[in-house]
Amino acid sequence: MDEGDSMTVLKQHHAPGMPAEVYDQVAAGALPSQSEADGFVAHYAIVEDGGITVIEIWESIDQHDAWFNEVVKPHLPPGTPEPRFAELHNSNTK
């Protein structure tokens, strides 16, 4: 891989205290545009630890940020931690 190439990333974003109903409202407005966003691969959400954790796959952090900062971030409760990213070493899907 060339130095300038971006790596596919896994995003983990936990919103403590966010009820599933609030996630559902944000997701209803956000997921249609996410499906069309450059670099988007997959989205999963789980209810855990008294909140919601979103796990996503993106082709790059920059592509994630371009979409997320415009569409989702304005709707998050104050104090929501920033997402964490890890480069994917390998993946296998059906």
Image (cartoon, grey):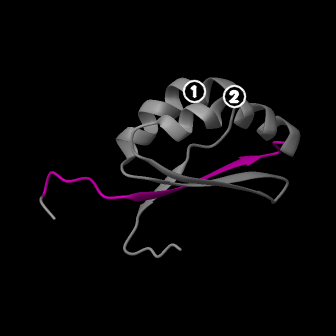
Of all residues shown, which one is farthest toward the left? 2
- The percent position of residue 69, horizontal first and vertical second, equals 51, 29
Is 6 rendered above or below residue 82?
below
> Can residue 11 be seen at all in this image of the molecule?
yes
Q: Residue 77 at x, y = what percent?
A: 73, 31
Asked if residue 37 lies left or right of residue 25, the reply is left
Residue 19 on image: x %, y %: 86, 43
Residue 77 visible in the shown view: no
Residue 36 image position (x, y, % from top left) = 49, 36
Q: Residues within 10 Å of mark 1 (few under 14, many from 20)?
A: some
> Across the whole image, how many numbered discs are drawn on residues?
2
Q: Is residue 66 left or right of residue 23?
A: left
Magenta region = 3-19
Residue 65 part of the magenta-drawn span: no
**N-term-proximal mark, 1 vs 2:** 2
Hey, what amino acid is under mark 2? Gly
Say which residue label 1 marks: 71
Which numbered disc, 1 or 2, marks the residue closer to the eye? 2
Where is residue 9, by image quadrant?
Answer: bottom left
